[in-house]
Amino acid sequence: MSIRTALLCAALAASSAFVPTVSEARVNVDIDIAPPAARVEVVPAARAGYLWAPGYWNYSGHRHVWVGGRWMRERHGHHWVNDNWVQHDNHWRREPGHWD
C-alpha cells in the first residue's frame, strides 16, 4: 500500500467518527407542506440479527425526498420507532426514527 493510500484511508477513518448514525441524527424542521403518501416497498426476506426499517419522506432542498428502507442491526432490549411525520397546528415535523 502506498503512503498516499494509507493517508487517505486514515483520513477517511478519522472523519467517519464525526458522522452521526441513523439513531443519532435528530433535526426537527417545521414545514407547511404535508409529505406525500408513503411509497410501497417490497420488504426483502428476513435476515438473522437485523430488522427492516421502512423508507420515509425526508425534506431537503425545499422538497420531499424519498429515503428507501434499510436493514439495521438489531439492538436487543430495544425496539425501532420508524421515521414519522406529525402535524402541529398548520405545520409538519418529521420525527426521525430511533431506538427505544
Image (tube, helix red, strand yellow):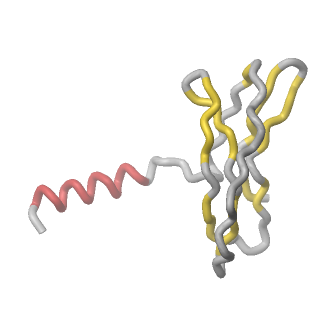
Is residue 53 or residue 28 the one in the foreground? Answer: 53
Percent across and percent down for residue 78 are 78, 67
| Picture quarter with the N terminus | bottom left
Is residue 97 or residue 52 the one in the foreground? Answer: 52
Percent across and percent down for residue 23 are 65, 53
Does 67 sit above or below residue 48? above
Determine the residue located farthest toward the right in the rendered image: 89
Determine the residue located farthest toward the left in the rendered image: 2
Is residue 30 or residue 60 the one in the foreground? Answer: 60
Answer left or right for 92 relative to 22: right
| Picture quarter with the C terminus | bottom right
**Residue 75 picture quarter:** bottom right
Residue under the image location 70 percent in, 32 percent down: 28
Residue under the image location 71 percent in, 46 percent down: 39
Residue under the image location 26 percent in, 58 percent down: 10
Does 17 sit above or below residue 6? above
Does 89 sit above or below residue 13? above
Answer left or right for 45 relative to 90: left
Residue under the image location 69 percent in, 69 percent down: 51
